[in-house]
Image (cartoon, rainbow, N blue to C red):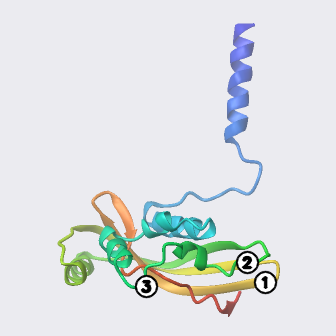
């Protein structure tokens, strides 16, 4: 009887972890900042949105005249309709050691701080906003860098997406 109870509990736990819907692909480490960026914009979470960028880029944005405490709330065309934001990454290319050195030099020039970039990947991110009335999309090249053990979007904080292309 005890074995049957344990077996039933294991079966219940297994069912909890199984998904009946569409399988989702695991997000690779270098994709994480983009995935977080999209989720933060979807849920109007400005702090999580800003954390996708390097600490110095985030600080520079927070100290700028264009700082918007509710930045994530303004990124989508929110209205009465339900809005979903999704992304697709393509043209992924890992940078070589010369590319990493160039990024480190650029970082030093922009933020007056030395960093060691362990890895970097450039890619095209296609962002799509879907509402009941249609889809709008925008593509932009994004570079992500690994500093210490964290991946960040390299460059200035993205304050808006030009979601004007018809999906």
Measure the alpha-carbon separation of dots 3 and 1. Answer: 30 Å
Q: Residue at x 60, y 59 (%)?
A: 25
In terms of depth relative to the viewer, which is nearer, 58 or 161? 58
| Residue 75 at x, y percent in the picture | 59, 79
In terms of depth relative to the viewer, which is nearer, 118 or 68? 68
Q: Residue at x 77, y 71 (%)?
A: 82
Could you say whether the residue bearing mark 2 is in a helix, strand or loop? strand
Q: Kindly tell me whether residue 31 is visible in this rendering.
A: no
Q: Which residue is mark 1?
A: 134
**Relative side of 109 to 79, left or right:** left
The numbered dot on residue 125 is none
**In front: mark 2 or mark 3?**
3
In this rendering, is residue 10 above or below 122?
A: above
Q: Kindly tell me whether residue 55 is visible in this rendering.
A: yes
Q: Residue at x 56, y 57 (%)?
A: 26
Could you say whether the residue bearing mark 1 is in a helix, strand or loop? strand
The answer to whether mark 1 and mark 2 are in CB contact below 8 A is: yes
Q: Which residue is mark 3?
A: 66
Image quarter in which the C terminus is found? bottom right
In terms of depth relative to the viewer, which is nearer, 132 or 61? 61
Measure the alpha-carbon separation of dots 1 and 2. Answer: 6 Å
**Relative side of 19 to 160, left or right:** right
Image quarter in which the N terminus is found? top right
Q: Residue at x 82, y 83 (%)?
A: 133
Could you say whether the residue bearing mark 3 is in a helix, strand or loop? loop
Residue farthest along the bottom direction in this orientation:
165
């Amino acid at each position: 009887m005890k074995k049957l109870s344990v077996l039933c509990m294991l079966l219940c736990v297994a069912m909890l972890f199984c998904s009946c819907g569409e399988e989702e692909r695991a997000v690779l480490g270098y994709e994480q900042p983009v995935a977080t960026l999209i989720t933060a914009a979807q849920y109007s979470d400005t702090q999580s949105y800003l954390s996708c960028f390097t600490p110095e880029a985030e600080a520079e944005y927070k100290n700028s005249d264009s700082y918007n405490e509710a930045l994530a709330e303004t990124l989508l065309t929110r209205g009465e309709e339900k809005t979903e934001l999704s992304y697709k990454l393509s043209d992924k290319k890992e940078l070589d050691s010369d590319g990493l050195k160039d990024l480190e030099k650029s970082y030093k020039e922009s933020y007056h701080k030395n960093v060691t970039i362990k890895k970097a990947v450039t890619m095209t991110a296609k962002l799509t906003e879907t509402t009941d009335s249609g889809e709008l999309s925008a593509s932009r090249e994004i570079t992500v860098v690994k500093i210490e053990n964290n991946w960040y979007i390299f460059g200035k904080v993205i304050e808006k997406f030009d979601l004007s292309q018809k999906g």
